[in-house]
Amino acid sequence: MKIFIATGEVSGDIAGARLAAAIAEIEPGASLFALGGENMASAGVEIDFPTNHLGTVGVSEAVRTLPSLFRAFTQIRRRVRREPPDVVVLIGNDVFSVLLGRWLRRRGVPTISFFPPQVWIWGALAPLINRSFSQVLTCFPQELEVYGRAAAGIDCKVTFVGHYLAENLTARTRDEHREARRKLCREQGALIALLPGSRKHEIGRLLPVLLDAASGLARRDPDMRFVLPLADERYRQEVERAIERRSLKPFVILNHDSHSAMRACDLALIVSGTASLEAALLGVPMVIVYRVSGLTNLVVKSAITLGLMNDSIVGLPNLILDRPVVPELKQRQATALELERQAWTLLMSPNDRNRMAAELLGVAARIGAENSMARAAEAVVGLARSAKAAPVM
């Protein structure tokens, strides 16, 4: 059995690695190859083309990756023609996956969308998106509703499998918080996690905002400390230089484990996306920061005006809960001064932080499903077996 998996960023690579491990449990002899990164490679997947650096948020941001995406597309077309897989799993990477899925289906290759294009952005195009896939595996109830409704009359099955993170991350207890804090930082002041994202353009755009806010907070309270998990070692020098320019080195702890940082912190200043979902599942109070290019922002505003998007909420916790539980600072609001103000207000109000943490418990209730990754793997292997068993026309 040959299975191809494609993704374009770190979070998708992690999900792909977990999916590969779950597939191996069901079908030990399966041959897996992929567009992906180090996580899938460590899981025993043959990497045809490294793609963890291709993840973007926005329109103009995506343009910069087009040459690499074209090379990846060309690479996989050659591989598929030479060695047709029994099934292809396309993880995230919205536009690329939809286009590649359409090409694969025209060649008769069964395709699965895992972590499909977010319905909060692409919901109005769900019928067109469904046509690119044989099956859509959804992680959020809103996806099941939108893609399920759009699948009527289309040869596309939509299945809710839940989000694997809801099984792996549970709300921290007070003891876990204290123990994580003790291991990470023995200082007595407040500890704030700074999470600027894993994509290069996110770090370039948001890291200065987070560090400038940290400088202001450290001036308010010199006992305060910050922990900044490095999503990718390639960014270490850039991050260290930015910290040194602001004379923050005595205040900032660098590590590689975002989950330990979240468990230990009193508050997280965090980019929208998977990291904010992880923080929500851990019950960590946070402020979400979102800043994209002017062109992307114009496209988003136009989509909202035209009714293609419901509203301008961007943080996954708020989208899942369908209400603004977590403060969001977007575009022009996403300044260091405003972030500092919001963070200080929450730090001075333990009741507000406790209330937010309690409301965030609802996130796991909405996206949780028992053995979610095993469910996804069963869907992948099941479709591959059906394809192998189908008579040749």
Image (spheres, rainbow, N blue to C red):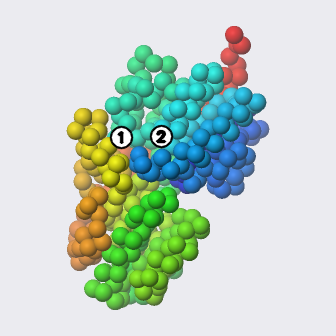
Please identify the residue farthest to the top as the structure is shown.
Answer: 393
Instruction: Name the residue beneath numbered marker 2.
Output: 94
- Residue 116: horizontal and vertical position, in percent? 47, 38
Q: CA distance from mark 2 to mark 1?
A: 10 Å
The answer to whether marks 2 and 1 mark residues whose Cβ atoms lie closer than 8 Å is yes
Quarter of the image holding residue 248? bottom left
The C terminus lies in quadrant? top right
* Nearest to the observer: residue 45 or residue 58: 58
Quarter of the image holding residue 75? top right
* Nearest to the observer: residue 181 or residue 101: 101
**Residue count near mark 2 (Cα–Cα under 10 Å), binned few <14, some 14–19, many ≥20:** many
**What amino acid is at disc 1?**
Ile
Q: Image point 39% across, 78% down: which residue?
A: 191
The answer to whether one can see residue 21 in this image is no
Label 1: which secondary element: helix
- Residue 211: horizontal and vertical position, in percent? 39, 75
The N terminus lies in quadrant? top right
- Residue 169: horizontal and vertical position, in percent? 47, 58
The answer to whether 268 is drawn above or below residue 362 in the figure is below
Q: Earlier in the sequence, mark 2 or mark 1?
A: 2
Instruction: Name the residue beneath numbered marker 1.
Output: 121
Q: Image point 51% across, 78% down: which residue?
A: 240
**What amino acid is at disc 2?**
Asp
- Residue 49: horizontal and vertical position, in percent? 67, 47
